[in-house]
Amino acid sequence: MSFLASFRALTLASCLFLCARVCRGATADEWRSRSIYQVITDRFALSEGTLWMPCHTNLGPYCGGTWRGILENLDYIQGMNFDAIWISPVVAQLPQLTPDGWSYAGYWQQDLYTINSRYGSLGDLHALIDAVHDRGMFFMMDIVVNHMAFSGAADNVDYSILNPFNDAKYYHHYCEMDYSGKNLTSLEECWLGSWFVPLADLRTEDQAVQEIFGDWVEEMVANYSVDGLRIDAGVNVQPEFFTNFVKRAGVFATTEVYLSDDTSACKWQETSGSILNYPLYWPLSSAFKHGGNISGLVDMMESEKSSCRDTTVLGTFSEVSARLPAQRRRDRTNRV
């Protein structure tokens, strides 16, 4: 064996030994009782010492929230009795201003192997994850497997700038999305996005794409000590994709399936393990609004027991639309 081959083997062995000591990952049983706080990284908190300036969010800009800002506010999150956080996708985004704004939310990815420096440094990200784990909390990473983003016309995409899917062969031909939710072929093969920022739809049914994603997610989970995954736009990816993908990840995953019909939505739970519970979201919201009726909520809860494999790991969620006056004052000083 050559010196270089020996060195590579030794390096791999060392990495595997290190991973065995520090890599985490959590099962569905461990996640079942967790309360997860979602953080839109750019819009949550500035790093300490950063000069606060008004941010006109209607224009879609970056507002300056960082991983360091989240770390410095973990007391706030944990103080509300949350024991896990879910942050925005961490990978590099479409870099330029578009008529739709900037990619502050993290879902217009262009390079899966580079982090988004607008959120901070690699050291900042690792420091955040370490601090989360030091508190006994879980870390959930948001990821996208449906698409890559481009600024320009859908029929003129420069695939060479997209990493690692840098060729048209990895993508479905362009077609406009049917957002009715009734055409599953359209949901799985047509493109999300807009005229200004088309989201090139990946051929996740192809073996080559599946293998590339499998390699990538293994690295992400190991490199960042990820406890769980939230998978964006899961309904736009055929359910069969997730069987091997989640197996390669080796951690709990919950998938965004934006459908109101539980029979259809729970097909994704069969392969990914968990979905965000949108079928329950709408009757839940309706039940507790003024003049609402709770019978629809009860009916959906009963229906899900037969449609879904395990309702105890479905992601039920709430949205906070206002804060207490004291918190609003605090927000003006150290939050975006």
Image: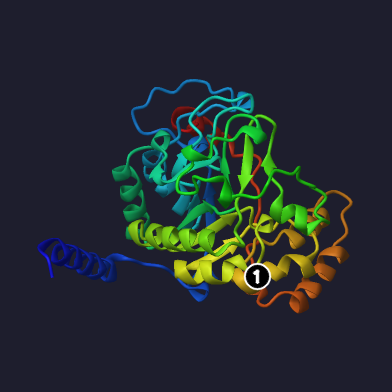
Tell whether 308 sits left or right of 130: right
> Where does residue 13 sit, x and y in percent of width and height?
21, 69
Q: Residue at x 74, y 44 (%)?
A: 175
Residue lying at the far left of the rendered structure: 3
Query: Considering the image in quadrants, where does the N terminus appear?
Result: bottom left
Disc 1 residue crowd, few under 14, some 14–19, many 20+, Cα 10 Å: many
Could one spot residue 78 in this view of the protein? Answer: yes
Report the residue marked by disc 1: 269
Q: Residue at x 53, y 71 (%)?
A: 244
> Where does residue 326 sit, x and y in percent of width and height?
53, 35
Label 1: element kind: helix
Could one spot residue 83 in this view of the protein? Answer: no
Q: Residue at x 61, y 55 (%)?
A: 203
> Where does residue 71 sit, x and y in percent of width and height?
37, 45
* Display coloring: rainbow
Tell whether 325 sits left or right of 9: right
Q: Residue at x 80, y 75 (%)?
A: 302
Q: Which of the 4 image quarters holds residue 320?
A: top right
Tell whether 13 sits left or right of 49: left
